[in-house]
Image: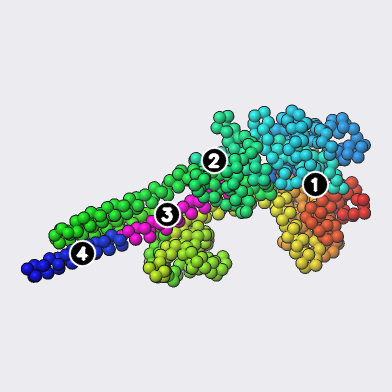
Amino acid sequence: MNFAHETHRIALIRKRILLIALMGVLATGLVASLSTSIPFYYSARNNLEQITLTGVRSQASVIDNLLDKYQDLAQQFTGRTEIRVRLERYHAGNMSLADVSAFSEPRLKEAMNLSDELLGLVRLGVKGEVLARIGQTPATLEEIITPFKNFPVSKQDGYTFVQLNGLLIVRVDANIFSKEGDLIGQDILYFNGLKLIDVLNDRLQLNNKANVYLANLVNKKRLSYNKSNKNFVLVEEIDSKKMLYLSKANKHKECTIRPDSNCKNIIFIIPLVDSNWSLVAEIPVNSFYSAIRQQVLWPLLAIIFMLGVAAFAISKALHPLIRRLTFQTKELEHSTEELRLIASVFEGTREAIAVTDAKMHLIKVNSAFSQITGFAAEDVLGKDLQNLFYKKKAIERLQTKIQQSLEVKDSWQGEIWYQHKNSELLPVLQSISALLSEDGQVINYIHIFNDISESKANEERINYLAHYDQLTGLPNRTLLNRRIRKAVDKALNCNQSLAILFMDLDHFKEVNDTLGHPVGDLLLQAVGQRLKAILREQDTLGRLGGDEFLAILDHSAKPDASSVVAEKIISALTQSFMLAGHEIKIGVSIGIAIYPKDGCTVDELVKNADIAMYRAKESGRNTFRYFSEAEDL
């Protein structure tokens, strides 16, 4: 009887050991599934948010370029010499309102052909009186003056959005200054908002359910799409709850606001350059994360299935040993299939995945890794992954930053530059996650990255369009202002001087009027080539717009040096141009401002050089003049 009891006890121990072993196998499978699924989910989520933010940033850059183009067109109107001279006479009381209107309106109307997007124009005097009104404009003077009551208009208030005849209109205000720099009037231009609407409706890089709109976080205004009339309308007041979330963007240049219990949308905000307006994209969270959740759904279902199997195994734990062994064999076969499924996902994904040990030595890579980097698995296994980084991209500082992030939060994400096997640069968006042992020690690192070469190329193209003149390839007004500011800082630190040469082509308008704009464009390109051949490498040449060019002469210690350059320019541009079968002769008037004698800021130097250029024109053209403060008093 004691023997039978002992036999029964031994049988129970065997069954318990078998049960513990089975539970251990299931627990191991659960941990392995979770350790793979969770990093994959967070990495995919972060990558999706970064890609979407990049798309919103690209749309914001397009809007910035569009609005900069409108403001540049407005500056061209204010800079038309013959009209401005009449406005100066009117401002001084030497010309009547009727005369200045009669002279200005036909010439401004002709100039409106510069852009087919320009619908209307209003020119105001300093007292708000209407000097000219052309095309589609508001019906009353109050509607014209109300948006900006104070002169002059600041750069941040240089444009706004209004409704005109039920359509979205971009209104651009530009100050008009006399040669002496006094405010003598203001131009108000009304542009068709169709291109802006097209950009806001373009969801190709975003989610098809995205709600894209412009928001003024200072004035709490919102430009959004109205489904009823299929047009964008200006909402004067943003909902207080919505404003609470959007106000977070005031503390950041750009940000992603994830949803919480009070907001069911994920929000991406990109501020527009030099503006109180921001581009906002709201996407319903269910639509935004649906693709990622579907990818994670099947592993989670597999985990739930394994837990069900474990419950069933526990209920059958007291069955005969042979039956339990058979069941365990089936479970092992099922686990093998699960591992095959995981291996299939590892090899089938388009994202490069690499597994390293704690010292960053490669243990395993998938086929996407080889396709993106060009290195076969046998070429890199056992080697340090960081040896593939591009050595000239501040690699030591980047490696330190990655290591510090991994030590603090066991993960890192950002851009890394690799060197492809063919020696080309390879930018990627990479995430690194650590797998830890029970005592917190790093076992492995999982690296997941995507090739973002195309996105980088698009960013570089957008940056080029924003800073270079498309006709001549020279720096535009924005980039010129930045380089003047940099040259001034350098001259201040080195106790040196520099010269600003403001050049305006003589008789260019006659070329456009007689030979047409295509020949005029060829002439501007040819002028740019001759000017570049004269200047030094350290000098900067750019086009301000129209027939105006500007040069920055760095290290110009003596005024005589700039006069020598000016004489070379005049000599080069007075020589004939042979373009499209025509012999063309033009001239150039040059104004010179010297830092620090003639100004210490960008605006002062450019304005004074412009004034000196007008002195050169008054002196008979084809000459140059230095700015003289006494002469302009």
Colouring scheme applied when the structure was drawn: rainbow
- Front tag of 3 and 4: 4
Mark 1: few, some, or many residues within 10 Å (few <14, many ≥20)? many
Please state the horizontal and vertical placement of residue 22, each as a whole percent of the image.
24, 61
Q: Which residue is mark 1?
A: 505
Q: Secondary structure at mark 4?
A: helix
Three-letter amino acid code at disc 1?
Answer: Leu
Q: In front: 463, or 280?
A: 280
| Most frequent secondary structure within the magenta stretch | helix
Q: Secondary structure at mark 1?
A: strand
- Front tag of 2 and 1: 2
Q: Which residue is mark 3?
A: 41
Three-letter amino acid code at disc 4?
Answer: Arg
Res. 374 visible in picture: no
* Cα–Cα gap, marks 4 and 2: 59 Å
Of callouts 4 and 2, the N-terminal one: 4
Residue at 29% across / 52% down in the picture? Answer: 305
* Cα–Cα gap, marks 3 and 1: 61 Å
Q: Which residue is mark 4?
A: 16
* Cα–Cα gap, marks 1 and 4: 97 Å
* Cα–Cα gap, marks 2 and 1: 47 Å
Of callouts 1 and 4, the N-terminal one: 4
Span highlighted in magenta in the image: 29-57
- Front tag of 1 and 4: 4
Q: Quadrant of the N terminus?
A: bottom left
The residue furthest left is 1
Q: Which residue is mark 2?
A: 211
Q: In front: 379, or 414?
A: 414
Res. 537 visible in picture: yes
Please state the horizontal and vertical placement of residue 58, each as a whole percent of the image.
58, 48
584 magenta-colored = no
